[in-house]
Image (cartoon, grey):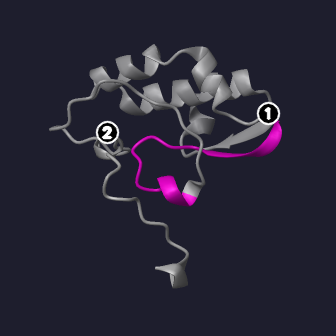
């Protein structure tokens, strides 16, 4: 695996808890909490809720509020449990997961504003 620069996790390390995380929950999944994260857009393409964050002029707090409103609007009345989980994410956690002075890009964001 050295040709591809891939590091394998030793078998004696438990990664069972990490495998329980999903970015695209199904109706069979038991959701316990929502976790804000910032990652390269190409790695989260399959996630259910995602926005593209780029350098810009918007402050982190305002961006976090816009993102939360967008996600809650996307979940809507069809997924009330997911909506409640998103509302339970502390503002500080959401804000600290973003970069300073950013620009948020997502389909449906202009309709929301």
The reply to whether dot 1 and dot 2 touch (C-beta < 8 Å) is: no
Mark 2 falls on what kind of element?
helix
Mark 1 falls on what kind of element?
loop
Q: Which of 11/47 is in front?
A: 11
- Label 1 to label 2: alpha-carbon separation: 31 Å
Residue at 20% from the left image edge and 36% from the top image edge: 29
**Would you call the spot at circle 2 few (<14 residues within 10 Å), some (14-19), or many (20 or more)?**
few
**Would you call the spot at circle 1 few (<14 residues within 10 Å), some (14-19), or many (20 or more)?**
some
Question: Whole-percent x and y of residue 78?
Answer: 27, 28
Q: Is residue 58 left or right of residue 48?
A: right
Residue 81, numbered circle: none
Q: Which of 3/23 is in front?
A: 3
Residue 55 in view in this figure? yes
Question: Whole-percent x and y of residue 98?
Answer: 68, 34
Q: Quadrant of the C terminus?
A: top right
Earlier in the chain: of badge 1 and badge 2, it is: 2
Q: Can residue 52 be found in the magenta stretch? A: yes
Up-down relation of residue 3 to residue 24 (above or below): below
Up-down relation of residue 74 to residue 12 (above or below): above
Residue 100, numbered circle: 1
Q: Is residue 27 left or right of residue 36?
A: left
> Which residue extends farthest bottom?
3
Residue at 33% from the left image edge and 47% from the top image edge: 15
Residue 86 placement: quadrant:
top left
- Single out the mark in the foreground, 1 or 2: 2
Residue at 53% from the left image edge and 24% from the top image edge: 69
Residue 77 in view in this figure? no
Q: Can residue 74 be found in the magenta stretch? A: no
Residue 17, numbered circle: 2
Question: Whole-percent x and y of residue 61?
Answer: 71, 21
Residue numbers of the magenta segment: 42-57
């Amino acid at each position: 695996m050295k040709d591809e620069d891939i590091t394998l996790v030793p078998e004696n390390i438990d990664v069972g808890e990490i495998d329980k995380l999903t970015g695209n929950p199904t109706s069979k999944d038991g959701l316990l909490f929502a976790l804000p994260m910032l990652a390269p857009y190409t790695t989260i393409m399959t996630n259910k809720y995602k926005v593209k964050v780029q350098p810009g002029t918007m402050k982190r707090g305002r961006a976090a509020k816009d993102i939360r409103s967008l996600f809650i609007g996307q979940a809507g009345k069809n997924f009330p449990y997911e909506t409640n989980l998103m509302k339970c994410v502390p503002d500080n956690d959401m804000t600290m997961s973003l970069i300073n002075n950013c620009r948020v890009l997502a389909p449906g964001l202009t309709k929301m504003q």
